[in-house]
Amino acid sequence: MDNLFQYSNSPISNILNRDPDYIETLKFLSEKIDKTVNIGTHFLNWAASIKSDDLSKSTILFMFRKIISDMDGMSILIASGNEESCRPIQRRMLEGSLALLYILKEDTYRRAMCYQVGEAKSKIRTYRKLLKSPNPKVDLKWGIKNMENMLKRKEYKAINTEWNAIKEKNKYKYDPLWYSLFNGPTNVRELNNSAFTGMSSGEYNVTATHIYAIYQELSEDTHFASSMKEMHIDVNGAACLNPLRNPIKLQTTIKFILIWADMVYKAFLGHFIPDKLDLYMCFRKEFIIPTIIELNGKSIFSFESKKNHKLIFCV
């Protein structure tokens, strides 16, 4: 009788190869993200050290922090060749980047405060749902009261009034998206278009339409609606399941991570520390743009060149 413990020590290698012969290439690629994250930490530190009474500043700093945190997480996955698990994080980074670009583009103070109101409303909604659970372990009523008191402050009053008015007009009384307040975008497609309007993307060779198509594809992965696309046709014409930690799309993943980081970094520095922008422009000229061009070139990975790493069972 088989004991499953004997199988727990190692996987089927052609389904999951944790020590591929291209591990140094994966490390090289992950370091591209690491360098970009590293300079982002300095940008965050410089901006955070600037004293300001502007309540909107915290919104921008926390959003920027989340974006570089997502990049750092994807770097870890890239180092192991796990492109597939990057996709939900990549989607979040993209949506966060679009949101931050929207805030920094114009009307920055009010848009940042709208984000805070939207987050407070979301917490209130969540806490009220949790109150219905048996024996909630935290003082949720205090949390709700705290958020409601915040929304009564004069800095938030006009935005809270706008939020409530939009919800009241909604036929189904859905909570409005924070960026839809004051005639803003009503969905991610419009947010994407708004963030990209007037922005030069010639160096990347991408358009707002292209970025939104990527967002839709990443959304399918996030919501588990695309598991059946993880297959390829082998040299004999048979449909084969892809292995785990499949690096075949890593080049494209890294390229777009760098593109979104570049857009965010320029906007962030331009808002907080414009005197550092020239430093970054030199870095992007010498590192970011050449890396993007390099990743646009010949494919590093292919199933044909890595035959020993593709699955041997077919459907």
Image: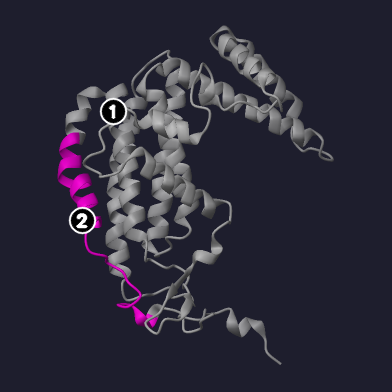
Label 1, residues with CA under 10 Å away: few <14, some 14-19, many ≥20: some
Q: Quadrant of residue 147?
A: top right
Whether 301 is among the magenta residues is: yes
The residue positioned 65% from the left and 82% from the top of the image is 4
**Marking on residue 238:** none
The residue positioned 29% from the left and 30% from the top of the image is 199
Mark 2 or mark 1: whose residue is earlier in sequence: 1
Furthest-top residue in view? Answer: 154
Residue under circle 1? Answer: 269
Q: Quadrant of residue 6?
A: bottom right
Q: How is the image coloured?
A: one colour
Instruction: Tell me how far mark 2 sits from mark 1, CA to CA.
Output: 25 Å
Whether 95 is among the magenta residues is: no
- Residue type at numbered disc 2: Glu
The residue positioned 47% from the left and 51% from the top of the image is 217
- Residue type at numbered disc 1: Leu
Residue under circle 2? Answer: 294
Q: Which residues are magenta?
A: 281-308
Front residue of 92 and 274: 92
Give the side of residue 285 with respect to residue 30, left or right: left
Measured as percent of width and height from the top left, residue 221 is found at 52, 55
